[in-house]
Image (cartoon, rainbow, N blue to C red):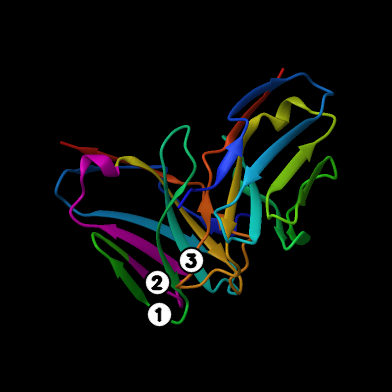
Amino acid sequence: KAGVTQTPRYLIKTRGQQVTLSCSPISGHRSVSWYQQTPGQGLQFLFEYFSETQRNKGNFPGRFSGRQFSNSRSEMNVSTLELGDSALYLCASSSDLISSGNTIYFGEGSWLTVV
Amino acid sequence: DQQVKQNSPSLSVQEGRISILNCDYTNSMFDYFLWYKKYPAEGPTFLISISSIKDKNEDGRFTVFLNKSAKHLSLHIVPSQPGDSAVYFCAASVQGAQKLVFGQGTRLTINP
């Protein structure tokens, strides 16, 4: 069974630009969530989508957005990039609410560097 | 306001001994807890989880203990192996939501 796949793995962008990151969840998983990891703030929840609807949202500015398609694939977008957006962006998937029989699996991440 | 805290940034343990990683939380609404292991440049790998209705869960070399009254959980790894060297994160959830709150991580080094 293929894991969570994220593309691209590495990218460099200039301040003010926008970026789109893509995530393919594990087959059969309908929930996709996104996290940002930085050295200073650690791992922080961005948002979660389930059946194409945003179900949960973290404390990030509106420059961070996402969407989910009917095949459960998800994209996240960051507009007007700032230097502080340089981070590892992680996508995770699960079939639904986590429990003893269901957990969240992470992809390898997309490394974004803003210069 | 850090709701999940891992107060030890690093831990060094001899191969074959027990590794104990600790995690404290402040939000009493958390009812599901997970431990992840992370290597550099990779995504977190799920290790083990525990529901608040239990106080212990075991999976092979990994055991997680939950003390709800103290709002404390710990991960025990026995015996520790060199491949266990990584950063370990504890995470918490409310009612099974995918909105995980992570601790800052503990870097575990297993010495031969």
The chain ID associated with circle 2 is B
Q: Position of residue A112 (x, y in %)?
A: 65, 28
Q: Earlier in the sequence, mark 3 or mark 1?
A: 3
Magenta highlight range? B64-84
Q: Nearer the viewer, mark 1 or mark 2?
A: 1
Counting other residues with Cα less than 10 Å from the Cα at mark 1, is it few (<14), some (14-19), or many (20 or more)?
Answer: few
Count how many numbered circles sit on residues in the image.
3
Q: Nearer the viewer, residue B99 or B28?
A: B99
Q: Nearer the viewer, residue A100 or A42?
A: A100
Q: What residue appears at the point 54 percent right and 58 percent down from the top-left corner?
A: B4
Instruction: Name the image quarter holding residue B20.
Output: bottom left
Q: Position of residue A46 (x, y in %)?
A: 70, 49
| Amino acid residing under circle 2 | Leu
Counting other residues with Cα less than 10 Å from the Cα at mark 3, is it few (<14), some (14-19), or many (20 or more)?
Answer: many
The chain ID associated with circle 1 is B
Q: SS at mark 3? A: strand
Quarter of the figure that contains the N terminus of chain B: bottom right
Distance, label 2 to label 3, CA atoms, is 9 Å
Is there a contact, CB below 8 Å, between mark 1 and mark 2? yes
Q: What residue appears at the point 17 percent right and 53 percent down from the top-left corner?
A: B79
- Which residue is denoted by mark 2 in the rendering? B66
Q: What residue appears at the point 28 percent right and 44 percent down from the top-left corner?
A: B84
Left or right for A12, reference B89: right
Q: Which mark is residue B54?
A: 1
Q: Which mark is residue B33?
A: 3
Q: Nearer the viewer, mark 2 or mark 3?
A: 3
